[in-house]
């Protein structure tokens, strides 16, 4: 017999964000179907959920169709770190585009609301600062980041075409750099790189002169935003920026990580990767108004929690 619980599909559920989302949905009495091909995700991220009878793991690649019965879909499947999404760029575009088509097709058959994990990368190297949702972006279509940026842009197009053509209840969230426990220690993103390097006493790798900026959101704040967004009426589609508007240079981040870890690591300067955005900060006015949401965990507190996680991981 069908349980009373809401059945929710999370693609990319074994990844960093996906595993936190699965956990929150289970805590909210949902039945969770976690779909993942384990490209960048790991069973370690979800092993603590596996004893829960309302949690199910399905190994599947979203570039292939999927037939399931669910009440809501969160589409997170896609590598997020530049190192990983550039490793097999063709597969990255396929994951974003074919994955969106397959998950939208599933949502259409089920008439289920579907949330897309889009990204601040759709703004490219932005010439408008901070970035509001109305800004169309500045993306190099043929550069090394394009497989991700253009894949995610095309996915947004598909979501809005499914809305216009089939009146599908869609939600598109543009996520700005999010960090926290369960980031992969080798995934190449700046927060995990710096913390792991600092804890191991290895050189901290600053790309460029470290003057480029990012805005870092702690994972718990982001997931709260996801849940509130999914709860909005069908006409609320986004795109909606979610992120922490606190903006820091990468050199400032390195200084904070060194101080909070008490590390003796030195800085090394390496070349800035091609098309690396010079600045990034979300305008979250819409999220504040629509969801009554804003981040509650500021950078130093979030870093302390993330450092504690990596300390345990490296000591294990
Ligand atoms: P992650 O790499 O930890 O998680 C991605 C998950 O998707 C992994 O578990 C991976 O194995 C899975 N996956 C990849 N390709 C797949 C495929 N073809 N089929 C099935 N599963 C597949 O990254 P994350 O930080 O958790 O990001 C999750 C989502 O959020 C991604 O869509 C990413 O683009 C988006 N996002 C994240 C950030 C961030 O700062 N963390 C920022 C912007 C957007
Ligand atoms: N970065 C760095 N050292 C590293 C990893 C990243 O200086 O070891 C820089 C990178 O060039 C970028 C910023 O940190 O300017 C954020 O990089 P990340 O890969 O985390 O995310 P994204 O560029 O997608 O925002």
Image (cartoon, helix red, strand yellow):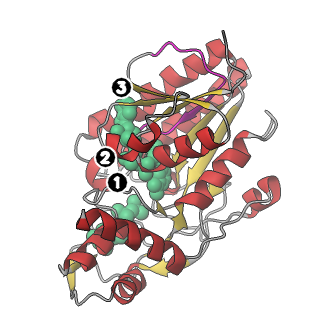
Image disc number at residue 81 = 1
Q: Residue at x 27, y 40 (%)?
A: 89
Q: Nearer the viewer, residue 277 or 251?
A: 251
Q: CA distance from mark 3 to mark 1?
A: 18 Å
Residue 37: x, y in percent? 33, 31
Q: Nearer the viewer, residue 15 or 113?
A: 15
Image disc number at residue 85 = 2
The answer to whether residue 115 is visible is yes
Q: Is residue 150 above or below residue 51?
A: below
Dot 2 beta carbon under 8 Å from ligand 1: yes
Q: Is residue 73 magenta?
A: yes
Label 3 vs label 2, nearer the camera: 3
The answer to whether residue 141 is visible is no
Mark closest to the chain's N terminus, 3 or 2? 3
Image disc number at residue 61 = 3
Image disc number at residue 50 = none
From which residue to which does the magenta span run?
66-78
- Element on which disc 1 rests: loop
Quadrant of the rendered structure where residue 12 is? Answer: top left
Residue 25: x, y in percent? 61, 40
- Element on which disc 3 rests: loop
Dot 3 beta carbon under 8 Å from ligand 1: yes
């Amino acid at each position: 017999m069908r349980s009373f619980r809401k059945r929710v599909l999370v693609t990319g559920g074994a990844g960093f964000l996906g595993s936190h989302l699965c956990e929150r949905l289970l805590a909210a009495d949902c039945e969770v179907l976690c779909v993942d091909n384990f490209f960048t995700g790991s069973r370690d991220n979800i092993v603590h959920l596996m004893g829960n009878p309302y949690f199910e793991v399905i190994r599947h690649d979203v570039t292939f169709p999927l037939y399931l019965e669910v009440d809501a879909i969160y589409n997170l499947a896609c590598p997020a770190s530049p190192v990983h999404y550039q490793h097999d760029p063709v597969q990255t575009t396929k994951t974003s585009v074919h994955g969106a088509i397959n998950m939208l097709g599933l949502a259409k058959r089920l008439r289920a609301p579907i949330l897309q994990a889009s990204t601040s990368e759709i703004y490219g190297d932005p010439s408008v600062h901070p970035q509001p949702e109305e800004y169309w972006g500045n993306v190099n279509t043929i550069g090394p980041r394009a497989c991700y940026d253009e894949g995610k842009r095309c996915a947004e197009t598909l979501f809005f075409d499914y809305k216009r053509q089939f009146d599908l209840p869609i939600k598109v969230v543009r996520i700005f750099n999010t960090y926290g426990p369960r980031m992969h220690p080798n995934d190449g993103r700046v927060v995990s790189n710096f913390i792991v390097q600092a804890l191991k006493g290895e050189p901290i790798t600053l790309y460029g002169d470290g003057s480029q900026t990012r805005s870092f959101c702690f994972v718990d704040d982001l997931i709260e935003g996801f849940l509130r967004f999914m709860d909005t009426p069908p006409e609320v589609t986004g795109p909606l920026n979610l992120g922490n508007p606190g903006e820091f240079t990468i050199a400032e981040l390195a200084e904070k990580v060194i101080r909070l870890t008490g590390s003796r690591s030195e800085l090394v300067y390496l070349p800035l990767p091609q098309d690396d955005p010079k600045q990034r900060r979300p305008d979250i006015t819409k999220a504040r108004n629509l969801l009554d949401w804003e981040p509650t965990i500021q950078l130093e507190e979030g870093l302390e929690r993330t450092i504690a996680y990596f300390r345990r991981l490296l000591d294990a």
